[in-house]
Amino acid sequence: MQSHILDSLSSRVVQPREESTQIADQQSSFVEAQEHLAAIVQSSDDAIISKNLAGIIQSWNPAAERIFGYTSEEAIGQHISMLVVPERIEEIPNILERIGHGERIDHYETRRKTKDGRVLTVSLSISPVRNRSGSVIGASKVARDITDQTRTRQALQAANDSLVRSVADLEQFTYSASHDLREPLRTVCTSAELLRASLAGKIDDGEAELLQYIISGVMRMEQLLSDLHAFTRLSSEGEKPEELDSAAVLPQVLSNLQSAIEESGAIVTHGALPVVHLHKFQMEQLLQNLLSNAIRYRSERPLKIHVDASRTDASWKFSVTDNGIGIDPQYTEQIFGVFKRLHSFTEYPGTGMGLAICQRIVQRAGGGIWVESEPGKGSTFFFTLPAAQS
Ligand code: ADP
């Protein structure tokens, strides 16, 4: 009986002691958390500043001192506008009003000044600070100095803009030059042909041959300039490509190449061809350049050419396959370069611009072009184009 009384007494006495231990524990973990937060603020690389709704600075961490040059003694109690450059002064009432409405401001890029008058580009993130009852009583602001970053970005942008301008100037120059130079060439060609006609029978074979060299040289140069002109023209056509049924383009291309097809005895077959996003004349040019190459670079075997297309994710992969002379694997990339050829003009006539034009067309449309080939067996040229949205 007595021990019961003692037990109940002791439990009554022990209870308050446990509660107070719990409270003490809570208090100490709260203090620990506070200290932890304070350490984060102290060691942050970003300025962390708090202010009240009147804009008066309440706290100022070491990074704020490092970035803006004011010590915490100098800054606390001052109005936040001491950091603002004159042309941005109207931002302050605006920011304070938004904060007063409980709004957060994220990654706001602006300019602020330091104690010694330097102007910095800063990225600000400002959040409202609330009291226990939830009313906004001020704001905490994290300011990151992005001056160097911004300068680098601006320098890069300026370099890029100037590069774009230079490329555009160069393209405009090539476009005009390749057009204008053809005019005097035509005069040379016509005059040489007239001369040949008027000298017929009066000059020997060697002299006639020399005249012929002049005429064919000039004609070749004319063709080179014409292809170069077509190549540069591709960049000045900026309108958005229409939806195009590529199957409808092939008959026109085959008709353009009719005499070459007949002369070579080529058998051209094709699979189902899709609707794509491309200008009609560009699709014509693409298929025509690839098919005329397949005809020109044929072997002794009866020529077979097959045009096909298959779907891959968001694009169509076209293929033009021939059983011609093929291409040495070491040249399969360089043949897409401007004026790049693997044969002499007398062996296989051409300007070396056909594949460069094809590449430019598909790249501008967001696709790619490549070739797989085996010398002596044939080649397959592949190109991709974005599929039309159904
Ligand atoms: P061109 O045919 O006027 O020389 P292209 O740019 O069309 O210019 O082709 C570049 C080179 O690629 C050609 O000179 C040729 O050597 C090679 N080539 C292109 N298509 C084929 C093909 N179907 N088969 C073999 N070689 C080819």
Image (cartoon, rainbow, N blue to C red):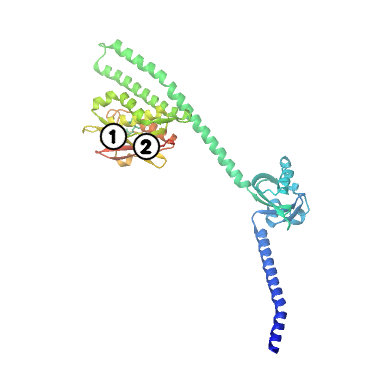
Residue at (77% x, 54% y) in the render: 74
Residue at (39% x, 16% y) in the render: 187
Residue 306 — which label?
1
Observer able to see residue 216: yes
Q: Position of residue 374 (x, y in %)?
A: 27, 40
Residue 383 — which label?
2
Single out the residue that lies furthest toward the bottom: 2
Quarter holding residue 329: top left
Closer to the camera, 169 or 3?
A: 3
Which amino acid type is shown beneath numbered disc 1?
His
Q: Residues within 10 Å of mark 1 (few under 14, many from 20)?
A: some
Residue 155 — which label?
none
In the rendered view, does 149 fall on the left or right side of 254? right
Closer to the camera, 251 or 377?
A: 251
Looking at the rendering, the quadrant in which ligand 1 lies is: top left
The N terminus lies in which quarter of the figure?
Answer: bottom right
Which amino acid type is shown beneath numbered disc 2?
Phe
Q: Position of residue 27 (x, y in %)?
A: 70, 68
Closer to the camera, 295 or 95?
A: 95
Marked residue nearer the N-terminal end (2 or 1): 1
Q: CA distance from mark 2 to mark 1?
A: 14 Å
Q: Position of residue 386 (x, y in %)?
A: 42, 37
Residue 19 position (above or below residue 305):
below
Residue 314 position (above or below residue 135):
above
Residue 269 position (above or below residue 215):
below
Residue at (56% x, 41% y) in the render: 156
